[in-house]
Image (tube, helix red, strand yellow):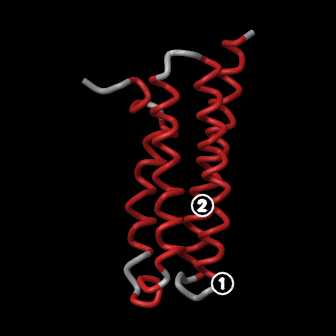
Amino acid sequence: MANFYENLEVYQRSFQLIPRIYRLGKPLEFERDYELKSQINRAAISIPSNIAEGAASGGHRTYRRHINIALGSTSELHTQVKLTHVLDYLQEQEAEDILLEIETIQQMLYGLRRYVEKQLT
């Protein structure tokens, strides 16, 4: 039985982004940059993980806090993807595609946060 958050498009899209981010670590040069590779992978994982954890918390305030953490992770991931392009680990078009997806996820999280905040009033 699926948890309700798994039906959220923002959860699905952020979850589907993880394999794309993990594949960034395939080039040999990036493979050697362990710190950046590890950080970018953790940021990607954090987004759907916080959506799930917040949804399971049972409280709107806690859910909002986890959405905010997920938003922070999208900003972190956005910065790191830009950095992978600057360091020539990632081609411009691929970087742009991933950045656009991250920005879409951010907008969806802002919408989810507004929805949850309405439940608090």
Residue 15 is tagged as none
Residue at the outermost front position: 35
Q: Residue at x 60, y 24 (%)?
A: 62
Q: Are marks 1 and 2 in contact (CB under 8 Å)?
A: no
Residue at the outermost right position: 121
> In the shown orientation, is residue 44 left or right of residue 103?
left
Q: Residues within 10 Å of mark 1 (few under 14, many from 20)?
A: few
Three-letter code for the amino acid on which mark 1 is drawn: Val
Q: Residue at x 66, y 22 (%)?
A: 115
- Residue 11: image location, x then y, percent: 47, 39
Label 2 element class: helix
Q: Quadrant of the N terminus?
A: top left
- Residue 116: image location, x then y, percent: 64, 21
Q: Which residue is mark 1?
A: 86
Q: Residue at x 67, y 43 (%)?
A: 107
- Residue 96: image location, x then y, percent: 61, 70
- Residue 104: image location, x then y, percent: 62, 50
Name the one closer to the observer, 11 or 55: 55
Q: Is residue 25 above or below residue 77?
A: below
Label 1 element class: helix
Q: Which residue is mark 2?
A: 77
Give me the C-alpha separation between circle 1 and circle 2.
Answer: 14 Å
